[in-house]
Image (cartoon, rainbow, N blue to C red):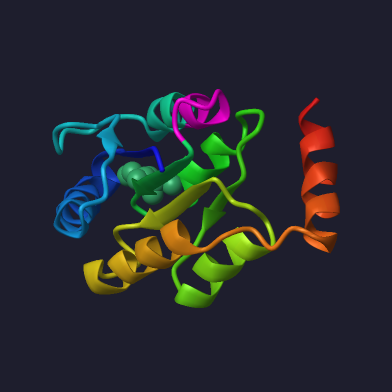
């Protein structure tokens, strides 16, 4: 799986912690920034990561900001993106099984690194159930056009 990760300054520390976790787990990723804790604008990172997932350069993305909300709202503006805000493991499983979410968002100011890593693990390993859910996801895709 080709994975991309990004954050603004509000999610920078959590991004670095998740990068360490991914490296320990042997999961390859590309970091689209931000690369320093300096203040920056989350829509820019969301657009870069969203477009790279939507065009197929990457299969999945992880986006972090202070709350996970702003960067997710922005990512969902990109056609083809289904970004899911998950701060619990149940949501991480079901955003994949039912919604085929292709971007996970979380907030550094909301969640601790231990739970965030578990959410990442579930988001990456869980497949899409398809079936009746596929028809609904296709209805979302129609809204992109
Ligand atoms: C930045 O201060 C903060 O607004 C941002 O990280 C995010 O939480 C927005 O939704």
Is 66 or 125 nearer to us in this picture?
A: 125
Is 19 or 28 nearer to us in this picture?
A: 28
> Does residue 108 appear in the picture of this structure?
yes
**Left or right of residue 120, residue 133 in this image:** right
**Left or right of residue 85, residue 39 in this image:** left
Q: Residue at x 29, y 58 (%)?
A: 108
**Left or right of residue 111, residue 79 in this image:** right
Residue 36 in picture, x, y percent from top left: 14, 33
The quadrant of the rendering that contains the N terminus is top left
Residue 41 in picture, x, y percent from top left: 35, 30
Quick check: is 65 in the magenta stretch?
no
The quadrant of the rendering that contains the C terminus is top right
Q: Give the range drawn in magenta.
A: 50-58
Residue 51 in picture, x, y percent from top left: 51, 24
Give residue 113's quadrant in the image. bottom left
Q: Which residue is drawn at 55% across and 54% down?
A: 84
Q: Is residue 105 above or below residue 47?
A: below
Is 77 or 99 nearer to us in this picture?
A: 99
> Does residue 68 appear in the picture of this structure?
no
Q: In this view, does 26 lie above or below 3?
A: below
**Left or right of residue 80, residue 141 in this image:** right
């Amino acid at each position: 799986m080709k994975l991309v990760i990004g954050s603004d300054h509000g999610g920078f520390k959590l991004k670095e912690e998740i990068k360490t976790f991914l490296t320990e787990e042997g999961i390859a990723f590309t970091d689209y920034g931000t690369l320093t804790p300096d203040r920056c604008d989350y829509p820019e990172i969301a657009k870069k990561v969203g477009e790279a997932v939507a065009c197929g350069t990457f299969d999945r993305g992880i986006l972090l900001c202070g709350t996970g909300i702003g960067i997710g709202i922005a990512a969902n503006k990109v056609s083809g993106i289904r970004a899911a805000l998950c701060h619990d493991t149940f949501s991480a499983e079901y955003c994949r099984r039912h919604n085929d979410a292709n971007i996970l968002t979380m907030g550094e100011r909301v969640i601790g690194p231990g739970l965030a890593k578990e959410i990442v693990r579930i988001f990456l390993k869980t497949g899409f159930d398809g079936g009746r859910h596929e028809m609904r996801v296709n209805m979302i895709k129609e809204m992109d056009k």
